[in-house]
Amino acid sequence: MIIGLALFLSALVWKSDHLKRASLGVFLGIAIIAMPTYMTGNAAQDILAKNPAASLPLIEAHQSWALLALIVISFNGLLAWIGLYQYRRKGSPASWVIPGIFLCAAASLGLMAVAANLGGDIMHPEVRDVAEGRASWLISSMSGELIKAAVTDSTTIWAACEALHFMGLAILFGMVLLIDLRILGFLKGVSFESIHKLLPYAVAAYAVNLATGMTFFIAASGQYTTNPVFFWKVGLLLVAVANLIYFTVVDDSWSLKAGDDASGRTKLAAVSALVLWIGVMYAGRMLPFIGNAF
Amino acid sequence: MTDFLTSIEQLGLSTWIREGGDIYGYALILFMHTIGLGLVAGVTFMLNLRLLGYTTMPLKPLTKLYPVIWYGFYLNLLTGVLLIMADANTKLNNWDFWVKMVLIAIGLVIQTRIQKKMLAEPGDAVPAGIQGLAWLSLFCWFGTILAGRLLAYVGPVAGLA
């Protein structure tokens, strides 16, 4: 994040569009890996909670601030994607994108500093009294535990999230099919630019599925962190998202006019998109059957 | 009626789907049902966005996608019937299931009407009066997803009773 911010600031100083685009790419990459990073923290929490030397209030405080950081970093990733998308279509991002990214990047750095500080104190009994005293007001602000309680107490929230998750899935799958059918030549009469115009709907659907999916994860993390199919789902998802970013930015697909044949590399990317997203759906659908998640 | 539904549930095929404990039974059928959902709702979503003017794709090549929607529908008709056979009593006695069926029926009628209008249109213009149908189509297919997903939560639910 520091590297991303440094790159971003130097891009602003030198007014370099290349550097700006590169820093947007870095922010987007950070946002993508922030999700599994948060998840491994949850898995570690389950193990650490059994260790008497670890401080439970500090673990929870660390977790809460990490969650806030994750939300801001993900939002920053969304802004970075919008910036890259607008660079591709219009040659420059809208006026609100760059300041928004600056604010989010600075805020997430602060949130991560707090989370890291709390995390560092978890296994240090000598500073525990001071650290826990500081932590008490921090925990109450926003806690994964609160979300967990709200979601597990209410079937309505869970069911609504499930329904939204499947609607998002349908939109993403429709987008991937449309891109693939064009790239592979079935819809050759359509320019890629006119399909590219629909990408924001797919990214909005992805944002909905990330939010609802993280809600499931926070509410019942134990059933996911011990489930091998879940690792497959997240792993495939990371590559699938990278694939979607490929089709957002590269010249190969962007320059395809009606009637043009796609390059071999782009066709390979299209085929892998379909395989990856079907893999994500398969692993997701199998969560209750191969593992034990509901 | 209950006797009849129970006799369906006790067919060899239904029992295997429900209780086979086999990943190729209930789980795989449910996965195929999800793929079909993606084909019907996902492709109609993209086509309806075009009809509503949110992008500029030429209309003629897109008519080639109509069969894709119908493959998705037939896949879900088949997998849906298999899923009902496994849990005939709970599904057919659930009001939410019938909401879902009505939405699908309206969705299919609308899709047929959209296709008829589009194929009758000689140029590359959006035919008059199609935007209302496009909105209704979105409502029906996303309503179907909602009603379908809620089958696991409202009314009689298999396995939880």
Image (cartoon, rainbow, N blue to C red):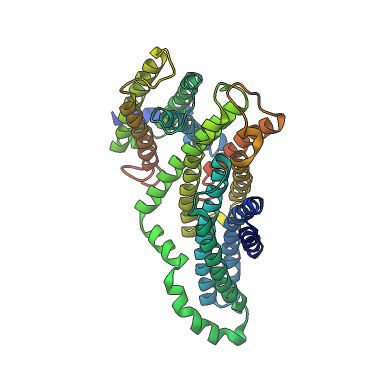
Q: Nearer the viewer, residue B52 or A162?
A: B52
Residue A274 quadrant: top right
Seen at 65% across and 63% down, the residue is: A6
Q: Quadrant of residue A166?
A: top left
Residue at the (63%, 33%) spot, across then down: A253
Q: Up-down: is A66 above or below A285?
A: below
The picture places residue B70, in percent across and down from the top left corner, at 45, 22
Residue at 66 percent of width and 54 percent of height: A19
User: Is residue A206 something one can see in this rendering?
Assistant: yes
Q: Nearer the viewer, residue B45 or B12?
A: B45
Of the 4 image quadrants, the one containing the N terminus of chain A is: bottom right
Compared with residue B86, is residue B129 higher up or lower down, i.e. above or below? Answer: above
Picture coordinates of residue A258, whole percent (x, y): 58, 23
User: Farthest front residue?
Assistant: A14
Instruction: Please provide percent x and percent y for residue B89.
Output: 34, 34
**Residue at image point 41% right, 29% down:** B48
* Viewer can see residue B10: no
**In this image, B135 relative to A213: left or right?**
left
Does residue A26 appear left or right of residue B50 in this picture?
right
| Residue A149 drawn at (x, y percent) | 40, 63
Looking at the image, which is closer to me, A47 or B56? B56
Q: Nearer the viewer, residue A174 or B151?
A: A174
- Residue B66 versus residue A235 in the image, above or below: above
Q: Give the number of marks.
A: 0
